[in-house]
Image: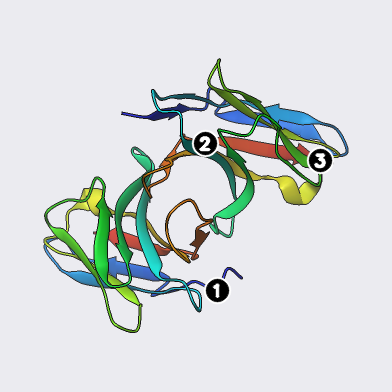
Amino acid sequence: AQTVTQSQPEMSVQEAETVTLSCTYDTSESDYYLFWYKQPPSRQMILVIRQEAYKQQNATENRFSVNFQKAAKSFSLKISDSQLGDAAMYFCAYMLGSNYKLTFGKGTLLTVNP
Amino acid sequence: DSGVTQTPKHLITATGQRVTLRCSPRSGDLSVYWYQQSLDQGLQFLIQYYNGEERAKGNILERFSAQQFPDLHSELNLSSLELGDSALYFCASSFSGLNTEAFFGQGTRLTVV
């Protein structure tokens, strides 16, 4: 079974600085997708960024970028120029290419200090 | 606003009771997913429907059932409720289901007392 591990239950960053959230996953499949979701206090699950495993290029969405290391099964999220609105729980998730379900990690609670 | 509507937002009920959670997907989305978020289990996939048919099943208890109606809204039925069923239940929708972005609703907070 696929598993997703987020080893940092909590992280903090100063406003305007950069922070990296870690995620590792375990799979024997080659066709899969990886995601980072953000859950602010409003509880809404918001997709931050998505990476297709077959793509070597790391995905980027504005201030958010990933470091996808397929061989190491690592998928970290870098947030640049952190803003107060980035404070939230961040979940790493995996989806098998032929499947429809997301497997989530336990989450990392990010605090942004002014 | 993701466009996915879940009702009710909060629900408090007693053990042994039965509740129904409702989800209206985004306009045009054919696929609906249900997830459970609890403190001890984290976020877990329960079940997925595509255009009225069950497509994938996860860690869904036998006391739970779901369906998707012809107008594509979905309902999650939870029966013989136990204290441990207290959780945040999310619905998500996507156009086709396969490798497409899923948009989440705001969830229904279920408290079993």
Amino acid tagged 3: Ser
Element marked by disc 1: loop
* C-beta proximity under 8 Å, tags 3 and 1: no
Badge 3 density bin: few <14, some 14–19, many ≥20, Cα 10 Å: many
Ranked by sequence position, the earlier of labels 3 and 2 is 3
Q: Nearer the viewer, residue B87 or A28?
A: A28
Task: Please tell me whether mark 3 or mark 1 is closer to you in this view.
Answer: 1
**Residue B32 coordinates in the image, percent (x, y):** 38, 65
Mark 3–mark 1 Cα distance, whole angstroms, equals 27 Å
**Residue A11 coordinates in the image, percent (x, y):** 66, 29
Task: Please tell me whether mark 2 or mark 1 is closer to you in this view.
Answer: 1
Q: Quadrant of residue B68?
A: bottom left
Mark 3–mark 2 Cα distance, whole angstroms, equals 18 Å
Amino acid tagged 2: Gly
Give the labeled residue for mark 1. Answer: B3
The numbered disc on residue A82 is 3
> Do badges 2 and 1 share one subunit?
no
Element marked by disc 2: loop
Q: Quadrant of residue B108?
A: bottom left
Q: Nearer the viewer, residue B24 or A41?
A: B24
Q: Chain of mark 2?
A: A
Residue sticking out furthest to the bottom: B71
Q: Is residue A100 above or below residue A94?
A: below
* C-beta proximity under 8 Å, tags 2 and 1: no
Q: Nearer the viewer, residue A12 or B43?
A: B43
Q: Nearer the viewer, residue A103 or A108?
A: A103
Q: Chain of mark 1?
A: B
